[in-house]
Image (cartoon, rainbow, N blue to C red):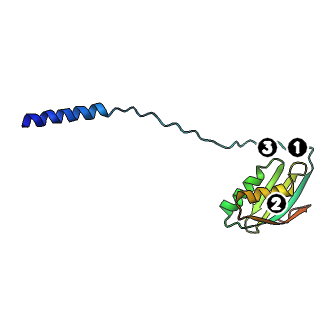
Amino acid sequence: MNRIKHIVSIMLLILVVVSCKNDAKPEIKTLHTESKTKKELDPNATYAKAEFTIEGMTCAVGCAATIQKKISNMDGVKYAKVDFDNKLALVEYDEATVTPNALEQTVTKVANIYKVSNMKTVNAFSIKKN
């Protein structure tokens, strides 16, 4: 009986050693990063300044920052600032490339809870441009 136990134990040991091959292939992950290259702005463009209210934002870090980033990434936008405390967006844009309607659509596409109102073209922003 002892001999059978030794044979079974040896067979199990051999089975474990043989079956535990380390053939794991390394996992390859691809990371997509955003390019930090600066947009080319048309030096001959006519730039307009717009201010508008954005309703529905609940935080400065998530809501306001996301909206600001989306507007800033639009072709023809020279400057964008979303002020969470005042619920105000300040945008300087190329009139030939960007329309006030396109700005509104960009904001509402971020999330359907955001509502744009009081869109107006101004000569100077009502709050300091940082």
Give x and y (percent) for residue 43. Answer: 90, 43
Quarter of the figure that contains the N terminus: top left
Q: Which mark is first along the chain, 3 or 2?
A: 3
Give x and y (percent) for residue 79. Answer: 81, 53
Tag of residue 39: 3
- From what the image shows, is residue 117 above or below residue 1? below
Foreground pick, 12 / 44: 12
Foreground pick, 78 / 56: 56
Which residue is rendered at x = 79% and y = 49% of the image?
Answer: 74
Q: Please indicate whether residue 109 sits to the left or right of residue 119 in the image.
A: left
- From what the image shows, is residue 108 above or below residue 12? below
Q: How far is the residue under mark 2 from the one under mark 1? A: 20 Å
Tag of residue 87: none
Q: In what element is the residue under mark 3?
A: loop
Callout 3: few (<14), some (14-19), or many (20+) C-alpha neighbours within 10 Å? few
Task: Say what amino acid the circle numbered 3 marks.
Answer: Lys
Give x and y (percent) for residue 19. Answer: 30, 33
Which residue is rendered at x = 79% and y = 56% of the image?
Answer: 80
Disc 2 to disc 3: CB gap under 8 Å? no
What residue is disc 1 on? 42
User: Which image quadrant for residue 101?
Assistant: bottom right
Q: Which mark is first along the chain, 1 or 2?
A: 1
Q: In what element is the residue under mark 2?
A: strand
Which residue is rendered at x = 87% and y = 48% of the image?
Answer: 97
Give x and y (percent) for residue 61. Answer: 66, 61
Task: Say what amino acid the circle numbered 1 marks.
Answer: Asp
What residue is disc 2 on? 90
Task: Say what amino acid the circle numbered 2 marks.
Answer: Leu
- From what the image shows, is residue 23 above or below residue 84? above
